[in-house]
């Protein structure tokens, strides 16, 4: 089988992944496309990339293979507690702020969008469990989603290698994981796993399980062009409650994007409320910008 993808073949796959997932592949990704699709071609006994493209777009079973194609070309670089300052801000400032405006017993709803194999969503759960908010059962409802079905299945299995857990504090690792010494595999305990529900979802489409108080959508928008980015941001905005918060990655900015988010700090935005100040229980809430 020819191990290289031609420029014409690459363009077909580049346009297809853009239509299906909104991902814009650079021309420098030709080798990546060839390498990642080779296994799928082998699985079907195909000898050239044109045949695989035809399978995806014309054959009756192309719909089933399309998910495998998307899984192969989506990037899933992640690990536990990536940018820990985000998780600290969540429990130190955002959750207490949100709880002030909720009836007693109501949960703070958090969505980890593009969660890959679940490390971000589970990091949120561990942070909440470790914080004083853990004294209130059910205080947080956490959902994770990703377009990659294989990643969602891995998230459900909740078994991780040493790289995924390498940046965790040793006490947290000992407290929440069971280590399989022979294979350097870490199995997350049920007490954290039961705090998170996972769904397959495409950020190009509205997420049907909102609205949420907090959304994490980090290091995802950088893979989209401006038109697709605007579409995703609109869906995220729609999924947030008024006054809800959005975390992005450090390489991403919503400033001057034309969307009604209020900039608070680098990587942190708030969905505009009807009034500039919110009065809850007879007190005016202090702005998070002032809160540090």
Image (tube, rainbow, N blue to C red):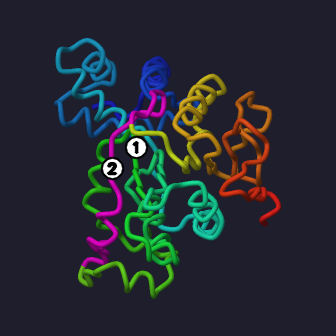
Q: Is residue 196 magenta?
A: yes
Is residue 166 placed above or below 44 in the rendered structure? below
Give whichever of 241, 181 is nearer the camera. 241
Look at 43% across and 40% down and name the residue there.
74
The quadrant the N terminus occupies is top left
**Which segment is the magenta one?**
183-208
Q: Give percent across and percent down for residue 84.
A: 60, 69
Give whichever of 32, 130 is nearer the camera. 130
Look at 58% across and 62% down and name the residue there.
95
Give whichever of 155, 181 is nearer the camera. 155
Label 2 belongs to which residue? 198
Outermost right residue:
290
Density class for disc 2 (Cα within 10 Å; few <14, some 14-19, many ≥20) is many
Look at 28% across and 21% down and name the residue there.
56
Q: Is residue 174 magenta?
A: no
- Which numbered disc, 1 or 2, marks the residue closer to the eye? 2
Label 1 belongs to which residue? 146
The alpha-carbon separation of the residues under discs 1 and 2 comes to 8 Å
């Amino acid at each position: 089988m020819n191990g290289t993808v031609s420029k014409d073949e690459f363009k077909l796959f580049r346009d297809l992944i853009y239509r299906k997932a909104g991902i814009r592949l650079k021309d420098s990704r030709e080798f990546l496309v060839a390498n990642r699709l080779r296994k799928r071609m082998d699985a079907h006994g195909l000898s050239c990339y044109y045949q695989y493209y035809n399978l995806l777009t014309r054959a009756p079973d192309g719909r089933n293979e399309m998910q495998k194609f998307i899984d192969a070309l989506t990037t899933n670089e992640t690990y536990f507690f990536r940018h820990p300052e985000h998780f600290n801000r969540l429990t130190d400032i955002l959750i207490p702020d949100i709880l002030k405006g909720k009836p007693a017993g109501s949960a703070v709803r958090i969505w980890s969008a593009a969660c890959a194999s679940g490390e971000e969503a589970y990091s949120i759960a561990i942070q909440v469990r470790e914080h004083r908010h853990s004294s209130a059962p059910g205080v947080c409802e956490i959902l994770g989603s990703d377009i990659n079905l294989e990643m969602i299945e891995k998230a459900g299995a909740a078994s991780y290698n040493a790289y995924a857990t390498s940046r965790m504090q040793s006490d947290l690792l000992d407290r929440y994981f069971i280590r399989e010494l022979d294979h350097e595999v870490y199995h997350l305990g049920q007490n954290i796993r039961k705090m998170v529900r996972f769904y397959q979802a495409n950020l190009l489409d509205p997420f049907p399980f909102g609205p949420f108080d907090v959304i994490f959508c980090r290091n995802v928008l950088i893979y989209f062009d401006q038109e697709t980015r605007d579409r995703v941001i609109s869906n995220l905005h729609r999924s947030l409650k008024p006054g809800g918060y959005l975390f992005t990655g450090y390489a991403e900015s919503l400033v001057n994007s034309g969307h009604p988010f209020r900039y608070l700090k680098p990587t942190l935005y708030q969905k505009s409320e009807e009034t500039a100040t919110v009065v809850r229980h007879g007190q005016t809430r202090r702005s998070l910008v002032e809160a540090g």
